[in-house]
């Protein structure tokens, strides 16, 4: 067993802006696990908001390299459990390793990941396509550039309702709203009625992650379902979100990988909550991994690779009509060049 990793710069087609950051290039760390002629790939992007850098992810992987290469694990779940303490402060690095472990493990089994998990790819919900915060004309231009049946609109400005009203004039697509913690409880409640009339399906993370009292009010009075994102990062958060949100958006990189992500999804389902998995502007490696578990979900946000000007990998092909998987086993993604 050999563990290695390297960094790729992912240039974006457009500056991507949300309530608390903007970027033109997204750094990503790609992990490789090699054994018996097979290669497993995993990925995690960096994120300044969560303090995740190439340097600290690399250090976390270096500190765990001997354990990985010892071969004293047989399944991705075992490797994840062994590494839990090492990666306690760096779930992003653990995600990249866990993803690579699942890719390699299922390749050894001679199966695609969704086959091993006994999931039906025909049940994958359609991904949304994300429109970042920008001037309204540029947001309209982005929609016209990519005609899509569902758009996730990033908000968190002083003119959020005006933005949605204007965008609605240019498309009949379903809207999903993501405020990235930018609103107050009263704003969310007040906005929800108008947003419902404007064809919005749900609101994602309207309040700050720790505003639990505010979320109680939003949950009770909102005209729209509310989905947790920043409030639901790790497994222990799922139960905390029950009764405050109608569903959760699991980010594999923040949770620590596919292994805990699957547990979070199943727990949310057992609580009667809607389930979603979102991306962090990964390449086709990370997006392909999400696609394999997407049959478990009510909603999915796996448009990351579609937002890139250049993708260093190839994997699932996503259109409004279907998701086409690569022919290979495992996650199926491959590096280009």
Image: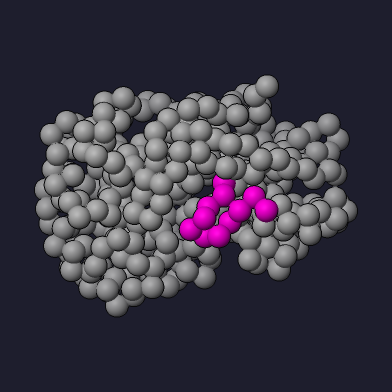
Please say whether residue 187 is one of the residues in the magenta stretch.
no
Q: How is the image coloured?
A: one colour
Asked if residue 46 lies left or right of residue 186, the reply is right
Residue 256 in the image: state x and y as whole percent: 60, 57
Residue 181, above or below 287: below
Q: Is residue 172 left or right of residue 35?
A: left
Q: Nearer the viewer, residue 243 or 257?
A: 257
Who's the residue at 71% across and 52% down the image?
58
Q: Quadrant of residue 3?
A: top right
Q: Which residues are magenta?
A: 45-55
Confirm whether residue 329 shows in the render. yes
Where in the figure is residue 11, as x and y percent of width and height?
51, 33
Q: Does 47 lie within the magenta span?
A: yes
Q: Residue at x 54, y 35 (%)?
A: 10
What is the x, y in percent for residue 65?
81, 53
- Residue shown at 42% from the left, 30% from the top: 13
Question: Residue 79 appears in which quarter of the rendering?
Answer: bottom right
The quarter in which the C terminus is drawn is top right
Can you name the residue that lies furthest to the bottom here? 213
Asked if residue 104 shows in the view, the reply is no
Query: x, y percentage for residue 145?
Result: 31, 25
């Amino acid at each position: 067993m050999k563990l290695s990793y390297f960094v790729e710069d992912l240039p974006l087609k457009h500056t991507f802006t949300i309530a608390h950051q903007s970027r033109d290039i997204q750094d990503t760390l790609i992990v490789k696990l090699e054994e018996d002629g097979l290669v497993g790939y995993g990925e995690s992007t960096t994120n300044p908001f969560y303090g995740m850098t190439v340097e600290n992810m690399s250090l976390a992987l270096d500190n765990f390299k001997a354990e990985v290469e010892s071969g004293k694990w047989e399944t991705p779940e075992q490797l994840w459990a062994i590494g839990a303490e090492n990666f306690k402060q760096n779930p992003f690095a653990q995600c990249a390793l866990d993803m690579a472990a699942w890719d390699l493990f299922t390749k050894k089994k001679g199966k695609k990941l969704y086959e091993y998990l006994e999931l039906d790819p025909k049940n994958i919900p359609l991904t949304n396509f994300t429109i970042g915060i920008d001037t309204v004309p540029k947001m309209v231009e982005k929609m016209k550039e990519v005609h899509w049946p569902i758009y996730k609109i990033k908000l968190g400005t002083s003119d959020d309702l005006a933005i949605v009203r204007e965008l609605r004039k240019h498309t009949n697509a379903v809207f999903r709203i993501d405020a990235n913690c930018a609103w107050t409880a009263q704003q969310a409640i007040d906005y929800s009625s108008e947003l419902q009339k404007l064809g919005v399906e749900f609101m994602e993370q309207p309040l700050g992650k720790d505003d639990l009292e505010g979320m109680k009010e939003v949950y009770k009075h909102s005209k729209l379902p509310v989905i947790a994102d920043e409030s639901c990062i790790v497994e222990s958060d799922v139960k905390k979100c029950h009764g405050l949100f109608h569903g959760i958006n699991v980010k594999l990189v923040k949770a620590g990988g596919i292994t805990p992500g699957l547990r979070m999804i199943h727990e949310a389902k057992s609580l009667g909550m809607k389930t979603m998995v979102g991306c962090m502007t990964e390449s086709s490696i990370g997006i392909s991994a999400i696609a394999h578990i997407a049959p478990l979900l009510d909603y999915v946000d796996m448009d990351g690779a579609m937002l890139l000007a250049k993708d260093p990998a190839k994997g699932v092909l996503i259109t409004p009509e279907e998701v086409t998987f690569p022919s290979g086993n495992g996650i199926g993604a491959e590096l280009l060049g």
